[in-house]
Image: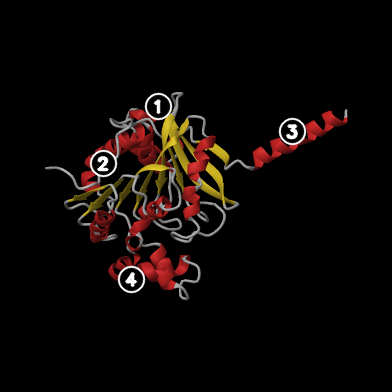
Amino acid sequence: MRFLLTSLICSLISSCTAQDSKIIIETQQIEDLTEYPIYSKLVNENGNWKPGYQYLDSIEIFTITYLSDGLQVKGLMAKPKKEGKYPCIIYNRGGNREFGALTVAHGAITLGQLAKQGYVVIASQYRGNSGGQGIEEFGGSDVNDVVILTKAVNEITSADHERIGMYGWSRGGMMTFIALTKTDKIRAAIVGGAVSDQYSSIEDRPEMETMVLSELIPNYEVSKEIELEKRSAIKWVDKFPKDVPILMLHGNADWRVKPEQSLKLALEFEKERIPYRLIIFEGGDHGINEHKREVNSQVMDWFGKYLKGDEPLPNMEYHGK
């Protein structure tokens, strides 16, 4: 009897521990898009999906709450409705605080267009945003909110957690760069309009320092140089893994993050023989909106080769006749 009681207690403790160790603590499906402003842009006068948005019937969109450093962080997820195992993409948003925060529109379009191609897509609002706990640090401890998602996908039934990619835009590109030095779970990465040099960002846009960096980075005035370097990939290219191919996209009319940041980083990648491809789009703005179709094609091709497919890594040794 004592053995049975002990076994029961151990079983209960084990069960509680398993529950406590869950990372994703809440998911809520967004079932009715008619309740959101984006709906009118997705349908025609008859209430049918406009051409290009029919895929919305084949995916599911969720808001999520998950744990990072003990904080409840908010995010979004989109995935195919059809049962199966799908590669994962962690999408890193741009902006700071509520500027650039993910909306249902991002779930339906940005995440949704990836999900329709057969990916489980998960994205963070970063701590302290959209009702989440904590305070973001613009590339500080909030990078953990991104890295932990490589483990969170283990809890998603349809996710192939052995195939994880990362896709970040603007500040999200910076988050991607830092994350690549903190986890070996990423198989392929894509960045667009990425911040790789905070010193250049401050020079080009002084308001970034006064209105963002100094407000969000702890002890900024005391340890400014240290904190800027932590957030400037161009200063630590030698820390990048050499087995993660990186696609870099940038518009040469981008005023928010000048294209020189990607050009200079590419030259450093050359020195370290990091597998990368850089595409500069003529006349492209920060979102490269003038070339959106080609951008989407490049994104799908990159993840298709290195994440969904089994394309071998490029030979970075100097070779040929």
Residue type for callout 1: Ser
The structure residue drawn at horizontal position 65% and vertical position 38%, both measured from the top left corner, is: 18
The residues tagged by marks 2 and 1 sit, at their Cα atoms, a distance apart of 34 Å
In this rendering, the label closer to the viewer, 3 or 1: 3
Figure colour scheme: secondary structure
Q: Residue 272: give x, y in percent of width and height.
A: 29, 55
Q: Quadrant of residue 165?
A: top left
Q: Which mark is residue 58?
A: 1
* Quadrant in which the C terminus is drawn: top left
From the viewer's perspective, is 252 left or right of 84? left
In this rendering, the label closer to the viewer, 4 or 2: 2
Within 10 Å of disc 3 (Cα), the crowding (few <14, some 14-19, many 20+) is few
The residues tagged by marks 4 and 2 sit, at their Cα atoms, a distance apart of 39 Å
Label 4 SS: loop
Within 10 Å of disc 4 (Cα), the crowding (few <14, some 14-19, many 20+) is few
The residues tagged by marks 4 and 1 sit, at their Cα atoms, a distance apart of 44 Å
Label 2 SS: loop
In this rendering, the label closer to the viewer, 2 or 1: 2
Q: Which mark is residue 11?
A: 3
Residue 8 sits above or below residue 272 on the image: above
From the viewer's perspective, is 213 left or right of 45? right
Q: Residue 112: give x, y in percent of width and height.
A: 38, 36
Q: Which residue is mark 4?
A: 206
Q: Quadrant of residue 25?
A: top right
Residue 116 sits above or below residue 221 on the image: above
